[in-house]
Image: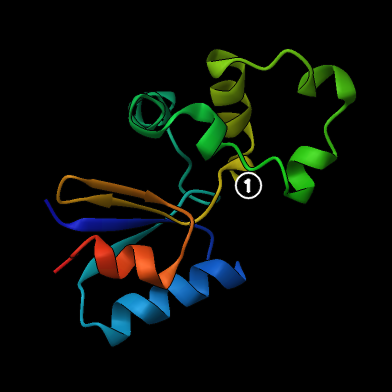
Amino acid sequence: MPLTLHGIPSCDTMKKARDWLDLAGIPYTFHDYKKAGVTATLLQTWCREVGWEVLLNRAGTTFRKLPDADKLGLDEARAIALMVAQPGMIKRPVLAGAGKLLVGFKPELYAAAKLQ
């Protein structure tokens, strides 16, 4: 299964991940989930693997701008609904494929994952 890098192109962290993959010669496809969207089914799969708390970017401006009522009492179903409605709330990048799911970018984690 080929690698897919999920995120938005304007994100600085995304640019670092793409540069790292390109420099390492690791092929991947890019999925812009802000333009192309993301399905609840895919997010549920990711949540089973890493947990919704890892996927939901609570530090981002999109989440911080939510009304307090939307932030309280979050559970997996509500978090997934928020991320589907506003994909900018998904922590990025998400690198999926070849039996791996990496959320966020740290060069040492990408190297340790042996993506090639």
Residue in the image at 33% along x and 31% along y: 49
Residue 30 x, y percent position in the rendering: 35, 62
Residue 54, placed above or below residue 44: below
Residue 63 falls left or right of residue 21: right
Q: Residues within 10 Å of mark 1 (few under 14, many from 20)?
A: many
Q: What amino acid is found at the position of numbered circle 1 in the picture?
A: Gly
The structure residue drawn at horizontal position 88% and vertical position 24%, both measured from the top left corner, is: 68
- Please state, as top left, top right, bottom left or bottom right, where the C terminus lies in the image: bottom left
Residue 10 seen in render = no
Q: Is residue 86 above or below residue 106?
A: above
| Residue that label 1 marks | 88
x, y (%) of residue 8?
54, 59
| Residue at 52%, 38% in the rendered image | 55
Residue at x-position 73% and y-position 47%: 59
Which quadrant of the structure image shows residue 87? top right
Q: Nearer the viewer, residue 87 or 19?
A: 19
Whether 82 is drawn above or below 96: the answer is above
Quadrant of the rendered image containing residue 51: top left
81 lies left or right of 97: right
Q: Quadrant of residue 21?
A: bottom left
SS label for mark 1: helix
The reply to whether residue 109 is visible in this rendering is yes
Q: Is residue 3 left or right of residue 70?
A: left
Percent coordinates x, y for residue 6 in the rendering: 41, 54
